Amino acid sequence: MADNYLEKRHEEVFGKGAGKGISRPSLDSLLLKNRSYRGFDGSYDVLPRQLDTIVSVNTKLGSGMNAQRLRFRCICGGEDASKVLSLIKLAGAHPEWGLPLPGTEPRAFIIVCATCEENPIVDIDLGMSLEAMTLKAVEMGLGGVIVRCFDAAALREALSLPLQPLIVLALGKPIERISLVPVHEGDSLKYYREDGVHYVPKLTLEDIKI
């Protein structure tokens, strides 16, 4: 769905300015839905224009020294998607889960590269970019998972990338139930699954303040 589609459509029907009354999800609600999904609806195809909309948020973000070093390759289905899937690992902390389960694999990807060697400034830009893109995906009814566990050299060769890949963002229509669990300093922070629900421990406000 294009940026502000509902508001623009509302204005087309009811006149300019009429769309201002349309309620929008709050940042808090988007953040709660912005989880690491590892299972997707196999019947839903992410479209190239949807990936373009997600990547376009980077044209509005801040960047260290305004260098804008990040570059993006969008992949929707087909042979390239199969190549990416074969070279990444999901839920690396729990390989025994065998994720993604057959039929729930992501088939859309954004490969994030940089025009220079990775450094602290690039990593800050990368973090801002990934959070903004995943939030945009959630706003559009999609979801994703940020993947760092992959063979970068093999992926670069498989996709004929001109730059070294830093991160793979896998995207799709999530089918998983994910719940945050408040915990305290010293408690286990490992995510776990029970009765089909994926639980993610999160420290409370009191625990992260110093």
Image (cartoon, grey):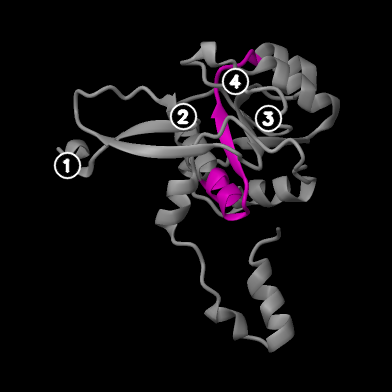
Amino acid type, residue under disc 2 in the picture: Asp
Q: Quadrant of the C terminus?
A: top left
Asked if residue 130 is positioned above or below residue 10 in the image, the reply reads above
The amino acid sitting under disc 1 is Glu
- The residue carrying pointer 2 sits among few (fewer than 14), some (14 to 19) or many (20 or more) residues within 10 Å by Cα, namely few
Residue located 46% across and 16% down the image: 93
Separation of residues labelled 4 and 1 (CA atoms): 34 Å
Q: Which mark is residue 195?
A: 2
Badges 3 and 2: C-beta atoms under 8 Å apart?
no
Q: Which residues are magenta?
A: 132-152
Residue type, label 4? Leu
Element on which disc 2 rests: loop
Q: Earlier in the sequence, mark 3 or mark 2?
A: 3
Q: Position of residue 59 (x, y in %)?
A: 61, 52
Give the camera-side residue of 8 and 57: 8
Q: Are marks 3 and 4 in contact (CB under 8 Å)?
A: no
